[in-house]
Image: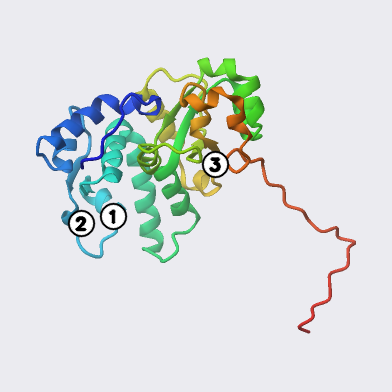
Amino acid sequence: MSTPIDWSRPWLQHLRESGEQVAKSNACGLSLHQALSIVPGTAIRFGPQHALPAGQAYEQFIFETSTVPTRDNLHDFFNGLCWITFPQTKKKLNQLQAAEIAKAGVQPLRGPVRDALTVFDENAAFLIAPQPLWDALLARDWKMLFITLRPLWKDAQLVLFGHALLEKLVYPRKAITAHVYRAQSAMNSIASLGDLDASVAAGLSAGGLAAKPFTPLPVLGVPGWWLENENFSFYEDSTVFRPIQTTKTRSVSQKPLPNPLI
């Protein structure tokens, strides 16, 4: 893995210590799975991709062996860092995946629970913020969220979890959007990453995730995360900062149009 990573980015600070260590070990000749395995306190094993038997589901293999098959690429680099940083949440996601596979096997279509688990694992973020910011985010009132309530962001923290999301942000683009998940604690105050990990893991369930408890957030809109958002015209791009879509329904008294095929 030779991709340069700018560890000064604000969205990487929670991964910086372990990330720099793994990247350095990898650059010195260790394979990525070896470099991840020697991080102190790692609660999961990492192995080469070829350890995954042909035909076996990736998540089922992790569940049965406590070993994460790892390729030498940026995607699996961030996946490994997330296993190291959020071990309880990653383990709970894996348990839920394995339970769904045990019930239905590996199907061409994942189903609502496995779909939601995948979205969570690949693209989730956690927001610790005062209630007014939450209200504005859920309403997708971007002007309120990022301009009117901008001073409140000093009391907020966005923590990125999804490894595909982190991979995309190595090359930041305005349109990159996280699926923000709100844990049962409402995440108004979290003392440490360990507390955050425990809180999120405790709140995860198949039924809860099937309801897709996510809300979109273009991450480069966060104050202090991207210089361009200091100019508030940044938020006027409706292709990125989209309003909630409303579905128009036909009045029950309106007669249906005739079907020309009848």
**Cα gap from disc 1 to disc 3, whole angstroms:** 25 Å
Foreground pick, 6 / 186 = 6
Dot label at residue 58: 1
Amino acid of disc 1: Tyr
Quarter occupied by the C terminus: bottom right
Residue drawn 19% across the image and 28% down it: 21
Q: How many marks?
A: 3
| Residue on which the image places disc 3 | 213
Foreground pick, 202 / 229 = 229
Rendering colour mode: rainbow
Residue 118 image position (x, y, % from top left): 42, 49
Mark 2, other Cα within 10 Å: few <14 / some 14–19 / many ≥20: some
**Cα gap from disc 2 to disc 3, whole angstroms:** 32 Å
Q: Is residue 68 left or right of residue 183?
A: left
Q: Is residue 101 left or right of residue 232?
A: left
Residue drawn 16% across the image and 31% down it: 24
Asked which secondary structure carries label 1, the reply is: helix
Mark 3, other Cα within 10 Å: few <14 / some 14–19 / many ≥20: some
| Residue on which the image places disc 2 | 52
Asked which secondary structure carries label 2, the reply is: loop
Query: Is any atom of residue 107 visible in this view?
Result: yes
* In the image, residue 257 above or below residue 60: below
Residue drawn 46% across the image and 25% down it: 225
